[in-house]
Image (cartoon, rainbow, N blue to C red):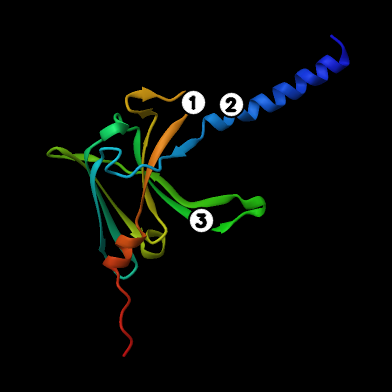
Amino acid sequence: MSRITQALLGIVVACAIPATVALALGRGLSESKEELNLKYDVSVSEGDAERMTVTFELEDEGRLKPISSIDLHVPGSDTQDGGGATSDLEISMATRREGTKQVSRVHLRKDWAARAEIRITTSNLDGKQGSRTWYYHAIPLKDLVDEANPPKPEN
């Protein structure tokens, strides 16, 4: 094989590897809860002075069935050089059955709760499994946190 052929083959391989890695990344779904036929309820209640309680109740997995996990994601407040971002917290929320619902509760610092989102993840969409792709439906908590923790009026 000539050096030119080897160089061209090397370039093709170098371009193909990142493309296959990119396919393994999660893809956020832009469809609404209703469009995905999801039935869930999220509530945020004030705990103590420093924490809040987030309760997630899933009744129907809709078009995402079967769900892989329900995760809590708190993006970092700092960005890295080059535009990357870190996470302050990323956990899988354990669920338990309560009647027909899957229920999860987590206690979270108030400042993190305002930035947090719940992600319903799956490798299936409409019963079709994605090739090296997973999907997530994000539920931001900011508005719920604001409702549960209104600013106190100044005297």
- Res. 76 mark: 3
Circle 3 packing at 10 Å, graded few (<14), some (14-19), many (20+), is: some
Please state the horizontal and vertical placement of residue 45, each as a whole percent of the image.
25, 62
- Taking depth in this image into account, of 153 and 96 the one nearest to the observer is 153
Earlier sequence position, callout 2 versus callout 1: 2
- Res. 132 mark: 1
Earlier sequence position, callout 3 versus callout 2: 2
CA gap between label 3 and label 2 equals 27 Å
Compared across the picture, whether 34 is left or right of 7 comes to left
Compared across the picture, whether 155 is left or right of 98 comes to right
Report the amino acid beneath label 3.
Gly
Report if the CB atoms under discs 2 and 1 are less than 8 Å apart.
yes
Q: Quadrant of residue 16?
A: top right
Residue occupying image coordinates x 51% and y 34%: 25
* SS at mark 3 in the image: strand
Compared across the picture, whether 101 is left or right of 16 comes to left
CA gap between label 2 and label 1 equals 8 Å
Query: Looking at the rendering, in which quadrant would you find the C terminus?
Result: bottom left
Q: Is residue 151 above or below residue 7?
A: below
- Res. 20 mark: 2
- Taking depth in this image into account, of 35 and 39 the one nearest to the observer is 35
Report the amino acid beneath label 2.
Thr
Circle 2 packing at 10 Å, graded few (<14), some (14-19), many (20+), is: few
Please state the horizontal and vertical placement of residue 32, each as a whole percent of the image.
33, 45
Report the amino acid beneath label 1.
Arg
Please state the horizontal and vertical placement of residue 136, each as a whole percent of the image.
39, 39
Residue occupying image coordinates x 39% and y 62%: 114
Residue occupying image coordinates x 47% and y 23%: 131
